Image (cartoon, grey):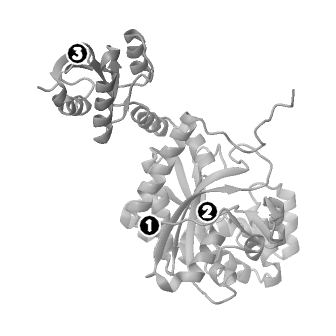
Amino acid sequence: MGEKIQRLPGFRDFFPEDCAVRNYVFGKWREISRIYGFHEYDGPILEPTDLYKKKSGDEILGQLFHFDDKGERGVAMRPELTPTLARMAAARHRDYKKPLRWFGIGQFFRYEKPQKGRTREFYQLNADILGEESKEADAELIAFAIDLMLALGFNKEDFIIRLSDREAWLDFMRQESIDSSSQEYFLQTIDKIEREKDEITNEALVKIGTTRGAVQNFIDSAAESKHFSSVINNLQARGLSDYVKVDLNVVRGLAYYTGTVFEVFDTNRNMRAIAGGGRYDRLCSLISDGTADIPACGFAMGDVVITDLIKQTKSANSKLLNYLGTEDSSDAYIIIADENHRNDALSIVQLLRNNGYRVSYPLTPTKVGKQFGNAENLKSRTAVIIGSEYPKIKVKDLIQREEIEIETDQILKFIKSIKNTPPEGPLLAE
């Protein structure tokens, strides 16, 4: 016997119940994207490796699934969508009225150590606004992220938006006379400040020409910074500012960003960032070698962390379970009590399906009791019983446990009546 083939580390199987949860998350992503006037797009899963090198340099190679294809091209499975977006926008931005409001839901791949909240393949929502340089666009994306969390069933006590800005840190560097050649090292140090040991952080800051105390004072006074006033005022007008906290500890690898950055965190801080993004005004120019200079901002939310948080949060999980209960049920199960009328039963199956009802029936002759059991397992609201009395048939509400005999041509009326009646509602409509 050969060795049993196992799933690859960091990759996932999606059984039907897992797909149902994934579809719920995708559905909410699409719902809020459309409410905000975003249009869906997508790109290829395989891109030239150089596309990612342009954005992140050669160090990105350690995170890529990459190889040379049969045409001897260096290619990589996409680790994110933003470089593809920049490539696409640079190629055809003149064909679209600005600002562009685009969202994408796709599968991505990163070769890194699998751990809680991080897998080697994952799905992600990307929402971006291109062609608008004002902070109004930044605020729009933050409002989008807040409304998305609320739509998923989270409350104000469950999450917080941590808001920061690259320009604020550039102000600090000028204030402290930190040489521009140290900028990247300084920002990387700030990015690790919450995770790194104090002595290592202090040593790095002294080497650059500042102190931990100066950095902390700047972080503590950030709320008064001019860089945040327009975003906060915008969110205040929407009644959403209480979901946001100015926090300069958030950096998000600022070499990529050019202004506002933000992250969504659960208030208990049990997980890594749920979502994050910001302004990246130079990426389109970089990807297009300067031919398309398009201001842009966006954010992304992955499916792994948000799904874990939904299941761990009572209100959000309750909303998910309500959806699953609805999606997992069928509208009717056709009970074939007399095999002589199987063809008549099939005509009713087709009639109901043609009218948009979810219908199941036994594919082979089966005892009536077992058929009722199958109907219960499928969470069918209604059983339609085709027996020797045909063309008279029986319709049974499996929740109310009440049954009525009707003529075949009345079936659509009665299925609709039962479907639209609450489980605790009155008897079948006459």
Query: Element under label 2?
Result: loop
Q: Amino acid at mark 2?
A: Asp
Q: How many residues crowd around disc 1 within 10 Å: few (fewer than 14), some, or many (20 or more)?
A: some
Q: Earlier in the sequence, mark 2 or mark 1?
A: 1
Looking at the picture, tell me which residue is in the foreground, 20 or 354.
354
Residue 1 against residue 234 in the figure, above or below: above
* Gap between marks 1 and 3 measured at Cα: 47 Å
Q: How many residues crowd around disc 2 within 10 Å: few (fewer than 14), some, or many (20 or more)?
A: some
Query: Element under label 1?
Result: loop
Residue 107 location, quadrant: bottom right
Q: Earlier in the sequence, mark 1 or mark 3?
A: 1
Which residue lies under the disc numbered 2? Answer: 247
Residue 13 location, quadrant: top right
Mark in the foreground, 2 or 1: 1
Which residue lies under the disc numbered 3? Answer: 402
Tell me which residue sits at (35%, 16%) in the image: 339
Query: Element under label 3?
Result: strand
Looking at the picture, tell me which residue is in the foreground, 401 or 254.
401
Assign the N terminus to one quadrant of the image. top right
Q: x, y (%) of residue 315?
A: 45, 37
Q: Earlier in the sequence, mark 2 or mark 3?
A: 2
Q: Amino acid at mark 1?
A: Phe
Q: Which mark is residue 38?
A: 1
